[in-house]
Amino acid sequence: MDNWVPLSNELYRLVWDKFYEHFNFKPSVHSNDWPSFSLPSPYITYKLTSYTNDDIDDLERNCVACLKLVTEPDEYLYALDWQHESFQYNPHLGPPSTISFYPDGDYYLFINKDFKWGYLGHPWEQTISIFGEVLIQQFEINKPKLFGEVVRSSD
C-alpha cells in the first residue's frame, strides 16, 4: 500500500469545496486578513519559531507520531496543498515525503476525512493551527521544538 494516494480531480474539488465552506477559508498574504480560516472548537494556534534542519526533522517526526496515535493503521487522512496536487495520506505507512508539515510557501493541511480534527499550516502568518481535542492532546505530549507561543486558542 502507498502512503500517498493522489486525489482524483473530482475528490480534489469535493474536499477543497468542503474545506472552503466548513472553515470559511479566505487565503491571503495580507496580515489584516489573517487568520485565513475559522476553526471549530477546540483549537490552538502556535507561532512558528526560527529553525534549523534538525528542528524541521523534529517537526516531521512529532507530526507523524501524533497522526499515528489518532488514526488506525489502515486509515487515510487528507493531505492538502493549496492550489497543488493533494493526497490521501496514511502516516502508518512511512514518513512524509510529498507534503511537508512546515508551511514554506503554501497552506499545508492534514485533516481527517470527517473533518473532526486537523493540522493547518499558514505560510505567511507562520503559524500552525491544530483543532480537535484528540489531536491537540497528542501535540501537547509530543510538542515540536518549532512551536512557539500560542497566538490564538478556543479557551
Image (cartoon, rainbow, N blue to C red):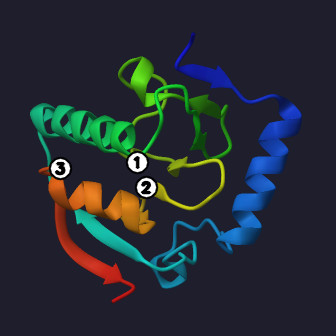
Q: Name the residue under label 3.
A: 144
Q: Is residue 74 above or below residue 109?
A: above
Marks 2/3: CA–CA distance = 17 Å
Marks 2/1: CA–CA distance = 5 Å
Marks 3/1: CA–CA distance = 14 Å
Q: Is residue 55 above or below residue 155?
A: above
Q: Is residue 126 visible?
A: no
Q: At label 1, which amino acid type do we have?
A: Pro
Q: Is residue 35 above or below residue 118?
A: below
Q: Which residue is drawn at 38% across and 60% down?
A: 134
Q: At label 3, which amino acid type do we have?
A: Pro
Q: Which mark sits nearer the N-terminus, 2 or 1?
A: 1
The answer to whether the residues at label 2 and label 1 have Cβ atoms under 8 Å apart is yes
Q: Mark 2 points at which residue?
A: 123
Tell me the mark number nearer the camera, choosing from 3 and 1.
Answer: 3
Q: Of 154 and 138, which appears nearest the observer?
A: 138
In the rendered image, which quarter contains the C terminus? bottom left
Q: Which mark sits nearer the N-terminus, 2 or 3?
A: 2
Q: What element carries label 3?
A: loop
Residue positioned most to the bottom: 155
Residue positioned most to the top: 1
- Say the numbered circle drawn on residue 145: none
